[in-house]
Image: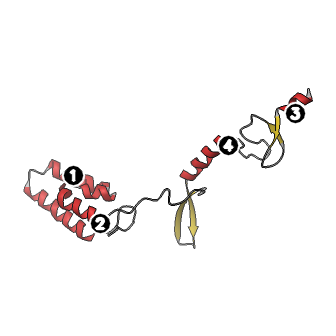
Amino acid sequence: MSEENNVNMVQCPFCAEKINVSAKKCRYCGEIVDPALRIVTEMKNESKPAVNIVSGSGVNIVPAGNNFSSAAGAVAPKQRITYILLGIFLGGLGIHNFYAGYSGRGVAQLLISLLVGWLVLPLVAVWIWVIIEVCTVDKDAEGNLFQN
């Protein structure tokens, strides 16, 4: 009977203890031995942010378990010219702010234009607001500078 039990046992690649051949996780060291489950777990851990405190005053947020290339998750910077053109042509609807990630400002401009757009004064105020934004905003909502 012990020979039959040994046939179903393999060595854990992490701690070299005997574990069941169908085990997903080693009961001795706790490591995941199933390759598919290990990949899924690593991907889940990578998507969770971990907070690292840097030199006492700042906080740096980096993905936990950063085993993959950082370029794979990098987002291309937004274009300043696109922001300006959207502001000029669709600024009254706040489309330029949605592009830059400022959804609160975009919703405010959209609602003002749609709800009280039949009045002239609110539309003038929105367009002045748009002109000021197009001239002064140089970062998106995440703090990344626009690309020229």
Q: Position of residue 4 (x, y in %)?
A: 88, 28
Kindly identify which numbered label has been placed on residue 110: 1
Q: Where is residue 25 in the image (x, y as percent from the top left)?
A: 73, 41
Q: Measure how far apart labels 4 and 3 are at the Cα level.
A: 22 Å
Give the mark, 4 or 3, whose residue is nearer the N terminus.
3
Q: Name the residue under label 4.
A: 35
Give the quarter of the image for residue 17.
Answer: top right
Q: Do the residues labelled 2 and 3 touch (CB within 8 Å)?
A: no
Which residue of the protein is positioned furthest toward the top in this rendering?
Answer: 1
User: Left or right: 140 with respect to 21?
Assistant: left
Bin the neighbour count of mark 2 within 10 Å (Cα to Cα): few under 14, some 14-19, many 20 and up. Answer: some
* Vertical placement of residue 68 versus 143, above or below: above
Give the quarter of the image for residue 143.
Answer: bottom left
For badge 2, the amino acid type reads Arg
Q: Which secondary structure lies at badge 2? A: helix
Q: Measure how far apart labels 2 and 3 are at the Cα level.
A: 67 Å
Q: Where is residue 58 in the image (x, y as percent from the top left)?
A: 52, 70
Give the mark, 4 or 1, whose residue is nearer the N terminus.
4
Kindly identify which numbered label has been placed on residue 6: 3
Tag nearer the camera, 1 or 3: 3
Kindly identify which numbered label has been placed on residue 80: 2
Q: Where is residue 57 in the image (x, y as percent from the top left)?
A: 53, 72
Q: Which secondary structure lies at badge 3? A: helix
Give the mark, 4 or 2, whose residue is nearer the N terminus.
4
For badge 1, the amino acid type reads Leu
